[in-house]
Image (cartoon, rainbow, N blue to C red):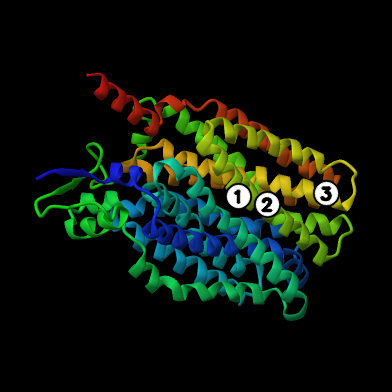
Amino acid sequence: MREINVHELADEAKFNRFHAKVLAWCFVVIIIDGYDLAVAGAALPAIMKEMGVEAATAGFMASSALFGMMFGAIFLGALSDKIGRRWTISLCVFLFSVFTAAAGLTKDPVTFSIARFIAGLGIGGVMPNITAQMTEYAPKRIRSFLTTVMFSGYAIGGILAAVLGKQFIAQFGWQIVFFAAGVPVLLIPFILKSMPESLSFLVSRRDSAQLRQIAQSIDPGLKIGANDTFHPPRATNAGAGATVAQLFQDGRGLSTVMFWVAFFTGLFMIYALSTWLTKLMAMSGYSLGSALSFVIALNVGAVIGSIGGGWLADRFHIKWVVVCMYALGGVFLYMMTLKTSTEVLYFIIAAVGACSTGAQIVVYAYSGQYYPSDIRSTGIGMASGIGRMGAIAAPLLIGLIVSLQLPLEQNFLVIGAAGVVGAIALACINHGRSASELTLKTLKTSTAT
């Protein structure tokens, strides 16, 4: 009889078909999530025209989904500790698919905002759960890379929203891109059947049958005896449900607050751009089709930034990788205030996407690695939830600046300042208290004794 450490098994595993399946499902869910969020920004000029709303009201309409995301990230992020990650992810997919499609049936700003708020619950709730899922199963040596590859699907969803908007909004109306969001609800039965459950959840429920099956999939060469048992790396509170207070224990207090600040500023940058870039570029004299092309460039840059950032994070210090990316995001946003050619502007916008959305994706990976497995979903969920305040503030603040008819350059300077503040916050994180560093120290101590 022996005790098998399930997280150590996952850490040391070699990438195989099982990991590819987990990555594929997480990638697909994030694409859908990214589409559902970006679709409002792609359709915003058409919605404003048809409903006859001003910029300030449009900002409130865009923020309604983000307000829902704040609650979804906090409450649905922790729900997986009680009902399991598969059911929580499936619930989130149902919410954001059905209610984004329902928003396409609305005729007024209030009803639209209510539908988008409910959809936002699912959009926000799926982020911490998907991050925790990929972090838990990814082999340690390529964990940052796989997590950021997964999250690049978020930007691909944004590209898909812009492409469909460019092709169909002018001909069929803005509603068509919202109706398309309802199709993924058909995937829920397949998610429940194919996606593996959280290792921590299964250990807390003492589900030996599923643990044996998953352990064998993680390491096909593993020989599991009839009397072998499974356990997490240390005593866990997952069965009782992780609490917010645990995020401030063991010297993690300052770093937890700094993660919250970084998420706030990072999400401020992302949602200011995803909501208003199309409208701002249209106000600069570009056609709707050209303005949506800039959105595509933004998200192509985000894909490159997320994958490249993940690659760098696995080879260098992940903390300083994200610090540099946030700071560069502020620099490139400042460069958008300079007069330049259209070709150079495309490059700058792509760089902004790499250092805003791409950087935030790497920060999701960093937060997933920072917290121990038993409070990982709660840690990411709280950071996402607090960060949503920045996401909510962004469309409202930029909408106010637009309604005041202030120079367009001021919009980009405000967004760029958020990147600088986020870089400072990330630099203040005590990396020595991260789960990976503490585990490494424990192993060195054990070896020395």
Q: Is residue 58 left or right of residue 151?
A: right
Mark 2–mark 1 Cα distance, whole angstroms, equals 6 Å
Instruction: Name the residue carrying label 3.
Output: 345
Q: Is residue 393 visible?
A: no
The furthest residue to the front: 221
Amino acid carrying label 3: it is: Leu
* Residue placed most toward the observer, 344 or 422: 344
Q: Is residue 352 left or right of residue 97?
A: right
Please state the horizontal and vertical placement of residue 384, each as a whole percent of the image: 50, 46
**Dot 1 lies on which element?**
helix
Name which of mark 1 and mark 3 comes first in the sequence: 3
Q: Is residue 205 visible?
A: yes
Amino acid carrying label 2: it is: Pro
Instruction: Name the residue carrying label 2.
Output: 395
The residue at the point 25 percent across, 56 percent down is: 216
The residue at the point 46 percent across, 66 percent down is: 93
Note whether 5 is above or below 81 in the view shown: above
The answer to whether the residues at label 2 and label 1 have Cβ atoms under 8 Å apart is: yes
The residue at the point 44 percent across, 44 percent down is: 380
Note whether 86 is above or below 247 in the view shown: below
Mark 3 residue crowding within 10 angstroms, few (<14) / some (14–19) / many (20+): some
Please state the horizontal and vertical placement of residue 47, each as a whole percent of the image: 72, 69
The numbered mark at residue 392 is 1
Of circles 3 and 2, the one toward us is 3
Amino acid carrying label 1: it is: Ile
